[in-house]
Image: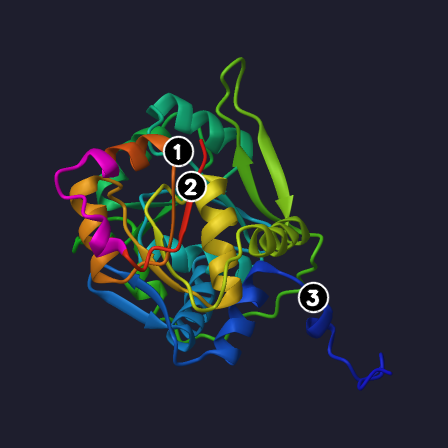
Amino acid sequence: MSLFSKSTLHPAARRQTIADALRRTAIRLPAKTGIVCGATTWTYADFDALVSRLAAGLASIGVAEGDKVAVLARNSHGFAALRFALARRGAVMVPINFMLKAEEVAFILRHAGAKTLATDSGLAELAQAAAQLDTQVAQFIWLPSEDPSQPVPGMHSFDVLAACTDPLPDVQLGSGDVAQIVYTSGTESSPKGAQLTHDAVMWQYVSCVIDAEIAEADVALHALPLYHCAQLDVFFGPAIYMGSTNVITSKPTPDKLLPMLEKFGITSFFAPPTVWIALLRSPLFDADKLAKLAKGYYGA
């Protein structure tokens, strides 16, 4: 027997979008630490509120529902916030491999039809060079990094956008709308853009939660690039969905990772075999200091 009639149940209660996943976690666990990156720490309530302000900020600079926004950036709290803000605005995220050359980045920008490109200080030169190669990019968004950095002149500042006080425009977003376009490596030909709907991503979250036993109690370390669907949608997204604590870094090296695993009491960590091997071979490796690491995942 249902407690709610179909006539009184708000449509959002049935909707499954990426931004809804964060909102529900923030309602359920408002005071819990959700994001840790460098000197930045956000509770889930902080994170959700910032994402809403950032989404309003995106609207204020002309980012509309369905617009393609490319992201060429290393892991950071800024990347994490933008990921959910784009979903809340109803825009489509296009994450780009930051190890590509300018010509390769430009191909993706042209193919996706991105008019806005988000980047960080370390990749600003590459982003600007790529945008000049016959693309539709008309504006840039500067994202903060794990380490302190200054906004790039001529780019919309993340901090300014995230302080927007305008009301968030009403978004008529459905679960079947496209959430992101992930590009293949283009090994045998030009990269192909795989369009993923909110439904597709959310069901992937559910599958990964079950198969990888991702839980609210986890303290997860996200060190591999968030532009890749493995780190973004197999581990980071599901961890937000469940309400885990998420520690983010852009430096997947033993001298960075091993101290972080110990310092934050990391219980869950994903890396390709090459990174695991480097950790095990490092002179800093001490199994006794990693006693809380209960879930180790690998893949390539």
* Residue 289 is inside the magenta segment: yes
Instruction: Specify start and end residues of the magenta stretch as a single range.
Output: 279-290
Front one among 289 and 81: 289
In the image, what residue occupies the spot 42% across and 77% down? 45
Q: Which mark is residue 79?
A: none
Residues at marks 2 and 1, CA–CA distance in whole angstroms: 6 Å
> Label 2 sits on what residue type?
Tyr
Is 190 displayed left or right of 261 in the figure? right
Question: Can you say whether 87 is above or below 113 in the image?
Answer: below
Q: Which mark is residue 15?
A: 3
In the image, what residue occupies the spot 80% across and 86% down? 3
Determine whether label 2 and label 1 are within 8 Å by CB. yes
Is 18 displayed left or right of 164 in the figure? right
> Label 1 sits on what residue type?
Asn
Residue linked to disc 2 = 227
Residues at marks 3 and 1, CA–CA distance in whole angstroms: 30 Å
Residue linked to disc 1 = 97
Question: Can you say whether 81 is above or below 111 in the image?
Answer: below
Image spot of residue 142 (x, y percent): 30, 51
> Label 3's element?
loop
In the image, what residue occupies the spot 61% across and 70% down? 170
Image spot of residue 65 (x, y percent): 59, 56
